[in-house]
Image: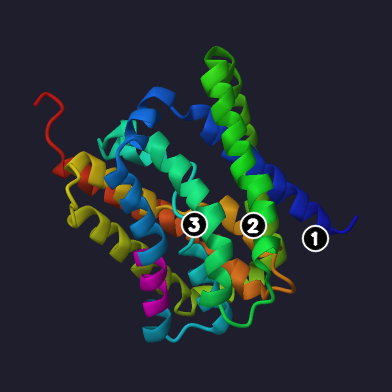
Amino acid sequence: MDIESIYKIVVMIFTVSNLAAMGLEINKDEAIVTLKNPRFIMLILVWGWIVGPALAWGITQIIPLSAPHAAGLLLISLAPTAPFFPLMVTKARGDMSAAGAFILVATIGTVIFLPLLVPFLIKGLTVSIWGLAKPLLIMVLLPLIVGFIIKVKKEAFANKIGPIVKKIGTLFLLITAVMTFWLYWEEMLSAIGSYAVGAQVLFLGILTFLAYKIPFGLKKTQRSGMALGMCTRNIAAVFVAYFSIVNPDPGVFVMIVLVVPIALVVALIAARIFAKDAKPLSE
């Protein structure tokens, strides 16, 4: 077995464990209440798969990105929310009751819309809709749903195994990061001197700002959660999509990897700003 095959296995374990952990952490009662709010659900879809991809496409037209980096940005734009999203909402003093529902809707939306939109948004990639959808269903949606079902049916058991599964996910995230740098360090270093980092900061910053500042009837604490969900990216789903593409350019993958630290930094800054803007807890 070569190093590339080992790497794909590591990424698969990272993906499945992180999505399962997200499912095990969802508060079922709070999620159900939020899922009954059609406005909130519609806004996730609008921000996630209309405004987000449109913004990413606009940035690729303005900033002279290389073709692989532009493709990576467009791919990233189709997968909102990350495993650390609930933590960011807590730091922002946002509405935690909406976080679980957001994760469910965003993950299901990613599985549906990413395969549909990739062939239209990213020219030159050899992909098929089913070729992208199948691994997303198996490795992204299924672990999340299984984790959520366990949470609903066996909450005590879910609370017991949840931290273990999360630690496994964190461990394999670190292994993935080390192996990624080992395999792609030259491409990553070259990306630092390009427009790749600036394009990602611009994309995440503008999308976060718009989602927070345009209310659409949402309370401030709900808008902060919406904004942070759009600021963070589902790197596990994007990994799965990348490895489903026939002969992808390594530059696409480098763009995907860069979003992990960039999204975390932008989310931390945004969460601090939202927390200051929120009403005191005693009010």
Q: Where is residue 9 in the image (x, y as percent from the top left)?
A: 77, 49
Three-letter amino acid code at the position of disc 2: Ala
Q: From mark 1 to mark 2, how far is it between C-alphas? A: 22 Å
Q: Does residue 200 appear to the left or right of 235 in the view shown?
A: left
Q: Where is residue 204 in the image (x, y as percent from the top left)?
A: 36, 62
Which region is colored magenta? 51-58
Q: Does residue 283 appear to the left or right of 262 in the view shown?
A: left
Q: In terms of secondary structure, where does tag 2 sit?
A: helix
Q: Are marks 1 and 3 in contact (CB under 8 Å)?
A: no
Q: Is residue 120 above or below residue 276?
A: below
Crowding at dot 1, Cα within 10 Å, few <14 / some 14-19 / many 20+, comes out as few
Q: Name the residue under label 1.
A: 4
Residue found at x 69% / y 53%: 135
Q: Does residue 180 appear to the left or right of 118 in the view shown?
A: right
Q: From mark 1 to mark 3, how far is it between C-alphas? A: 24 Å
Q: Are marks 2 and 3 in contact (CB under 8 Å)?
A: no
Residue found at x 8% / y 26%: 283
Q: Name the residue under label 2.
A: 133
Crowding at dot 3, Cα within 10 Å, few <14 / some 14-19 / many 20+, comes out as many
Three-letter amino acid code at the position of disc 1: Glu
Residue found at x 53% / y 22%: 151
Q: Which mark is residue 79?
A: 3
Q: Which dot, 1 or 3, sits closer to the camera?
A: 3
Residue 82 in sight from this viewpoint: yes
Residue found at x 57% / y 37%: 144
Most common secondary structure along the magenta stretch: helix
Q: Which dot, 2 or 3, sits closer to the camera?
A: 2
- Sequence-wise, the earlier of marks 1 and 2 is 1
Q: Which dot, 1 or 2, sits closer to the camera?
A: 2
- Sequence-wise, the earlier of marks 1 and 3 is 1
Q: From mark 2 to mark 3, how far is it between C-alphas? A: 13 Å
